[in-house]
């Protein structure tokens, strides 16, 4: 018991939090990230890496289902909570360690989770799942809603057994229809009568594809990017057909969130909010480019902008980071020519964001105004097709958050 | 007692020693991370301990269609490969296993890492993991050939594949002085096969963790610890190859090996902060067009020096 308690206390000193940001709550999400980091906690990369699912904003409809899907993938001990306003943040975060160390509650939660996926669906598969390994997915939920909506769930591996990419079956808006035509491909949900049982756990093997650019067999898979991915715009979902890790076909959609504009909270003037937003975007782009330590510096500036008012020290730090980013030849070489769309260059974009933020902090007149790429979701799609996945991530990270809001307005009236 | 038996007994403490070194490396990295975010250094120092406690308390998980056996082999294998690498490293005049082909043994172990990282990516039956596996293989194609040639440079210098011989051949001058290119390629390869710093695409955050995206609990702990252990083992192996092994004033040889190894680990941790990720597809071009000829020239230069000089410098 003593050892248990020591372990529990140690482990809650570094809670990993998975944030589900509802579109329209980006400021709240930034505040949450700042508060989480300030506690020495960590932002989770994926559900498997998380202890806590923190929903930022009011989850309705689709997002409620997404939250359920994520929740089912988080290993015990776990906790799920929602914040909709900044003033509730501290109390909500403070309560997390107590819940995670509550032995009885966590044991009860672990017991009610299914040991095997097969048991609940009532099909028998010869897949050998070690009974000691708990599944973190509930098939009940899988049957209720389809993988397309589940963020990073394992519908990502829906290999298409019919030789045609899934996106051919989808006409666009109605995402669930595609699933209806491919029964049983989601999350181990099984329908024996319609299925090619050739693959493991009844998931059909990857196939070839006539449009395949590399001509390799069995490397066409499907992967859904978003709505939960580290450093990914809230509400954006890209359903990809991959050839290896090149995007052959893509379907882009934006999930609707809150419509009302977010009121700045705390002691923040408009310019500071804008500067924080730009630092957020730059930090995300740097993280996607794989330069975490420098991204951390930029995000520290963002956090300080959100929580402090003395801007002299912050500006100095921002300038230092800006210089480091501008000097790096490796970054220039690694990001050169990305993305190929609309004459935008990831490194130039990064530089613009950081220098605009610096100008805002100094109260100087702003440099050149923002570009209007992408004008539609089709522009995004066009820029993604034929790209390697990590390039695609960079392309998406180059889109300004204000552009995403505009696109949201266009696609949802 | 027979020296082989003594070696075998000592080898029992090897995994623990390596784990402690890995913990130190993780703590050092976490301290720097904390500082970058404006947090206290203490928070960084205890971070690996807290992380370990957290992962030991966490539930393991599996996925529909996961190839559990291969997946777990990949996960546990990293730490094992790291221990096997350290097995042939001489600590002063003592070595756990004095193989006449120690250098080839090391090379075999880093080829093993190809399989392990790939199995981790493959076994999970998840999109992002698979992408991580692809990325590692793409990167491995770039680093492995230059690495193999870089490893031959010290062997040429010493005229032996036995690590004690390679270490002793550096009595006059450390190999790093007249084989700088070989050392740089070797160091970059260590960072690459540990999926670390500028070569971390296989475990990149942009791919939600890549090969580790679906791991939780003790499985994740084994991979994260294994990764640090591989990094430390790679650093330790550079000591007999390029830094004169246990040679140094005042302290015993074994201590010097440990000190030099940890210094190299510190260099690797710093490298993570200095360079952004190099994307595998761009890396291939440089590796095969630029680095390969460079390493071959390095080996040629080393060979000429050995012939002219009648041995190592």
Image (spheres, coloured by chain):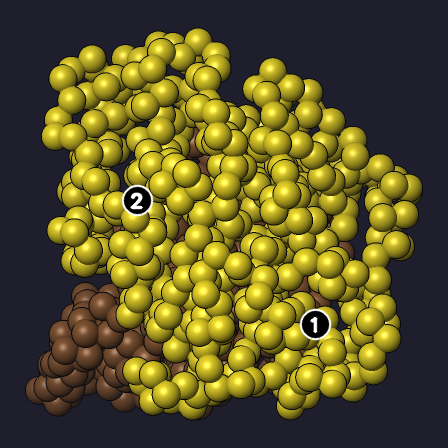
Q: Nearer the viewer, residue B174 or B186?
A: B186
Instruction: Say left or right for B95 vs B303.
Output: right
One can see residue B246 in this view: no
Question: Which color is chain B depicted in?
Answer: brown
Q: Which of pointers 1 and 2 lies earlier in the amino acid sequence?
A: 1
The answer to whether B234 is drawn above or below residue A377 in the figure is below
Q: Nearer the viewer, residue B25 or B223?
A: B223
The answer to whether A313 is drawn above or below residue A379 in the figure is above
Judged from the image, the secondary structure of the residue bearing numbered disc 2 is loop
Report the chain shown in yellow: A
Q: Mark 1 points at which residue?
A: A188
Q: Are marks 1 and 2 in contact (CB under 8 Å)?
A: no
The quarter holding residue A159 reads bottom right
Query: Are both tags, 1 and 2, on one chain?
Result: yes
Q: Nearer the viewer, residue B228 or A413?
A: A413
Q: Mark 2 points at which residue?
A: A399
What is the crowding at mark 2: few (fewer than 14 residues within 10 Å), some, or many (at least 20)?
many
């Amino acid at each position: 018991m003593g050892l248990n308690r020591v372990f529990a206390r140690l482990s809650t000193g570094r809670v990993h939090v998975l944030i589900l940001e509802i579109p329209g709550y980006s400021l709240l999400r930034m505040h949450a990230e700042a508060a989480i980091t300030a506690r020495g906690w960590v932002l989770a990369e994926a559900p498997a890496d998380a202890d806590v699912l923190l929903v930022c904003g009011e989850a309705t409809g689709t997002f409620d289902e997404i939250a359920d899907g994520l929740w089912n993938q988080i290993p015990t001990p776990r906790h799920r909570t929602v914040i909709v306003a900044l003033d509730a943040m501290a109390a909500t975060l403070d309560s997390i360690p107590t819940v995670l160390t509550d032995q009885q509650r966590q044991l009860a939660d672990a017991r009610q989770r299914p040991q095997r996926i097969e048991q609940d669906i009532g099909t028998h598969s010869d897949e050998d799942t070690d009974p000691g390994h708990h599944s973190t997915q509930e098939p009940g939920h899988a049957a209720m809603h389809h993988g397309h909506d589940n963020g990073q769930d394992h519908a990502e591996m829906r290999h298409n057994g019919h030789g045609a990419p899934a996106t051919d079956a989808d006409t666009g808006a109605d995402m669930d229809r595609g699933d209806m035509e491919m029964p049983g491909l989601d999350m181990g949900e099984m329908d024996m009568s319609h299925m090619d049982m050739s693959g493991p756990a009844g998931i059909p093997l990857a196939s070839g594809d006539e449009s395949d650019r590399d001509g390799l067999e069995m490397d066409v898979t499907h992967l859904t990017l978003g709505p939960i991915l580290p450093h990914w715009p809230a509400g954006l979902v890209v359903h990809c057909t991959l050839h290896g890790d090149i995007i052959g076909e893509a379907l882009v959609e934006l999930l609707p969130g809150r419509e009302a504009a977010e009121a700045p909270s705390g002691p923040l003037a408009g310019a500071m909010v804008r500067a924080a937003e730009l630092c957020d975007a730059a930090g995300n782009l740097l993280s996607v480019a794989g330069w975490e330590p420098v991204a951390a510096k930029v995000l520290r500036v963002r956090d300080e902008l959100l929580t402090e008012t003395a801007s002299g020290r912050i500006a100095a730090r921002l300038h230092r980071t800006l210089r480091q980013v501008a000097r790096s030849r490796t970054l220039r070489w690694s990001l050169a020519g990305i993305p190929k769309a609309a004459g935008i260059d990831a490194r130039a974009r990064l530089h613009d964001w950081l220098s605009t933020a610096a100008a805002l902090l100094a109260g100087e007149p702003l440099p050149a105004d923002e570009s209007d790429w992408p004008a539609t979701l089709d522009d995004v799609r066009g820029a993604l097709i034929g790209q390697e996945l990590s390039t695609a991530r960079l392309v998406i990270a180059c889109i300004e958050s204000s552009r995403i809001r505009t696109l949201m307005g266009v696609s949802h009236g | 007692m027979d020296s082989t038996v003594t070696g075998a007994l000592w080898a029992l403490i090897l995994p623990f020693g390596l784990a402690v070194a890995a913990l130190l490396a993780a703590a050092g990295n976490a301290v720097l991370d904390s500082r970058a975010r404006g947090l206290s250094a203490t928070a960084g120092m205890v971070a690996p301990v807290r992380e370990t406690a957290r992962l030991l308390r966490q539930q393991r998980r599996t996925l529909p269609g996961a190839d559990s056996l291969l997946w777990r082999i990949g996960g546990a294998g990293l730490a094992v490969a790291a221990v096997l690498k350290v097995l042939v490293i001489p600590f002063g005049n003592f070595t756990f296993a004095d193989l006449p082909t120690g250098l080839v043994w090391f090379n075999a172990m880093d080829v093993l890492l190809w399989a392990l990282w790939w199995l981790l990516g493959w076994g999970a039956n998840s999109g992002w993991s698979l992408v991580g596996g692809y990325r590692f293989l793409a990167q491995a194609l770039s680093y492995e050939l230059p690495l193999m040639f870089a490893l031959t440079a010290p062997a040429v210098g010493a005229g032996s594949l036995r690590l004690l011989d390679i270490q002793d051949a550096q009595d006059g001058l450390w190999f790093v002085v007249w084989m700088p290119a070989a050392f740089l390629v070797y160091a970059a390869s260590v960072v690459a096969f540990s999926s670390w710093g500028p070569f971390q695409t296989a475990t990149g955050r942009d791919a939600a963790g890549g090969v580790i995206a679906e791991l939780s609990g003790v499985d994740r702990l084994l991979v994260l610890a294994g990764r640090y252990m591989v990094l430390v083992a790679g650093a330790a192996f550079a000591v007999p190859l390029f830094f004169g092994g246990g040679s140094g004033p005042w302290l015993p040889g074994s201590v010097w090996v440990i000190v030099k190894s940890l210094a190299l680990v510190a260099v690797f941790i710093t490298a993570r902060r200095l360079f952004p990720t190099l994307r595998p597809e761009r890396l291939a071009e440089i590796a095969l067009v630029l680095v390969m000829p460079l390493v071959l020239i390095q080996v040629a230069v080393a060979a000429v020096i050995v012939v002219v000089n009648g041995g190592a410098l």
